[in-house]
Image (spheres, rainbow, N blue to C red):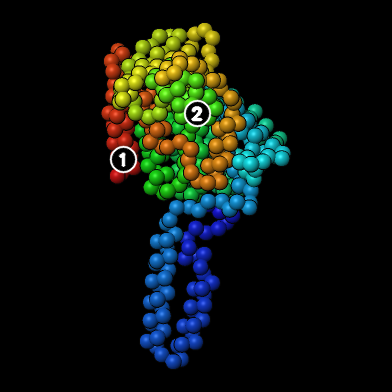
């Protein structure tokens, strides 16, 4: 995708100079042959029709010799400030070079205290950092080449990302991907249909220890199971694990990879324990912590040892991946894996509703995809 936001993606429009030459030629030929003019007009019409179809191809990527201008939707989370500090740091090199946050739309959800009570303060911080604050998503899209969708409330993500996809801007959607599994599926379908690059991830995924465990390069060796854990505070407008348990579930999927067949959940006021049975017979556990010391991590059961997968390494590894994504248009996390891990969390909620019975992840995902198709009218 070009970094010139004024560029028209309709190739027919972009080729107006040749078309103009065609018009001149028609005028020169008019005095010689009426039928020649008619044939030329028909040819121009076919040219424009063909190039309009070509204009529906995937958006091209930003040129390597220009700064990629990034806009943030949702200034109600500390991520908006932290990511901007990393991207806009002086003397950035390598993957972080030439990617800068230039504009932000505050957003905010009045019924979520974590959003309502923070949006003003974080907006002020972004303004003090030189980021232009704009009154609408549409205005933001006219100023940027790529988007960070950072709204802390997942429910508005679907409507906020629609114009981004329509504008053909690559977009990173922070956790939670959406406020429901159905909406996750809708977003994925919209982006796929428009061939717009998109991905979503917790920052924990890219910590080096978790990545090494996934590759089988940690002290544990090839992974045979995993116990991942994280804080797991709840928010009443979201499925239980979407709000904060997503961090530990992301670690679990980073280490194990996709392929979970079913989940069972045991729940109490202080903790959640979700056991996943993978298709290949491996078993893994997510522990969500609400009582006692809460931290992030994973214990890996491997072919060599039972070993820790390392520690959380902060936001920078994720931001580096986002910068690389904006430059290449290649998501570092497959959408199929993202949808499965959200189905894992939704299946955990269903298991809770059924008193801890095993719930099929595939069945939960299929139901959500059918609901998404109905919403889209497809």
Going from N to C along the chain, the mark reached first, 1 or 2, is: 2
**Left or right of residue 317, residue 157 in this image:** left
Question: Outermost residue toward the bottom?
Answer: 32
Q: Residue at x 48, y 52 (%)?
A: 59
**Left or right of residue 70, residue 32 in this image:** left
Residue toward you, 302 or 248:
302
Numbered label attached to residue 189? none
Image spot of residue 114 (x, y percent)? 55, 23
Secondary structure beneath dot 2 equals helix
Secondary structure beneath dot 1 equals helix
Give residue 41's quadrant in the image: bottom left
Q: CA distance from mark 1 to mark 2?
A: 34 Å
- For label 2, the residue is 211
Q: Estimate how packed mark 2 is, as few (under 14), some (14 to 19) or many (20 or more) residues with alpha carbons within 10 Å.
A: some
Q: Residue at x 36, y 12 (%)?
A: 266
Residue toward you, 60 or 113:
60
**Left or right of residue 85, residue 361 in this image:** left
Q: Residue at x 31, y 40 (%)?
A: 373
Single out the mark in the foreground, 1 or 2.
Answer: 2
In the image, residue 216 sits, relative to residue 371, either above or below, namely above
- For label 1, the residue is 373
Image spot of residue 337 (x, y percent)? 40, 33
Image spot of residue 156 (x, y percent)? 46, 34
* Rendered-image quadrant of the C terminus: top left
Question: Outermost residue toward the top?
Answer: 292
Give residue 70's quadrant in the image: top right
Across the whole image, how many numbered discs are drawn on residues? 2
């Amino acid at each position: 995708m070009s970094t010139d936001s004024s560029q028209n993606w309709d190739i027919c429009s972009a080729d107006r100079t040749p078309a103009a030459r065609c018009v001149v030629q028609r005028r020169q030929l008019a005095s010689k042959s009426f039928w020649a003019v008619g044939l030329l007009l028909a040819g121009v019409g076919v040219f424009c029709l063909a190039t309009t179809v070509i204009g529906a191809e995937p958006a091209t990527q930003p040129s390597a010799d220009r700064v990629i201008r990034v806009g943030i939707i949702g200034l109600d989370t500390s991520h908006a400030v932290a990511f901007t500090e990393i991207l806009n740091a002086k003397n950035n090199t390598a993957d972080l070079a030439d990617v800068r946050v230039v504009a932000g739309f505050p957003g905010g959800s009045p019924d979520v205290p974590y959003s309502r009570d923070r949006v003003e303060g974080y907006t002020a911080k972004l303004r003090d950092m030189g980021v232009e604050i704009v009154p609408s998503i549409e205005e933001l899209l006219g100023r940027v080449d790529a988007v960070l969708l950072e709204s802390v409330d997942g429910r508005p993500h679907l409507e906020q990302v629609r114009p981004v996809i329509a504008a053909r801007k690559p977009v990173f959607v922070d956790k939670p991907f959406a406020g429901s599994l159905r909406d996750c599926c809708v977003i994925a379908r919209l982006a796929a249909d428009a061939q717009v690059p998109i991905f979503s991830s917790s920052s924990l995924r890219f910590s080096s220890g978790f990545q090494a465990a996934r590759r089988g390069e940690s002290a544990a060796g090839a992974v045979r199971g995993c116990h991942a854990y994280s804080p797991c505070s709840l928010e009443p407008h979201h499925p239980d694990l979407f709000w904060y348990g997503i961090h530990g579930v992301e670690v679990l999927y980073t280490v194990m990879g996709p392929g979970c067949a079913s989940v069972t959940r045991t729940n109490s006021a202080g903790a959640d324990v979700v056991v996943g049975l993978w298709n290949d017979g491996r078993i893994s556990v997510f522990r969500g912590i609400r009582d006692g010391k809460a931290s992030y991590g994973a214990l890996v059961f491997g072919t060599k040892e039972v070993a820790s997968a390392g520690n959380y390494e902060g936001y920078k590894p994720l931001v580096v991946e986002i910068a690389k994504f904006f430059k290449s248009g290649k998501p570092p996390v497959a959408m199929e894996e993202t949808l499965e891990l959200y189905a894992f969390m939704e299946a955990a909620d269903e298991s809770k509703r059924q008193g801890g019975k095993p719930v099929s992840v595939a069945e939960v995902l299929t139901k959500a995809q059918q609901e998404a198709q109905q919403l889209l009218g497809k």
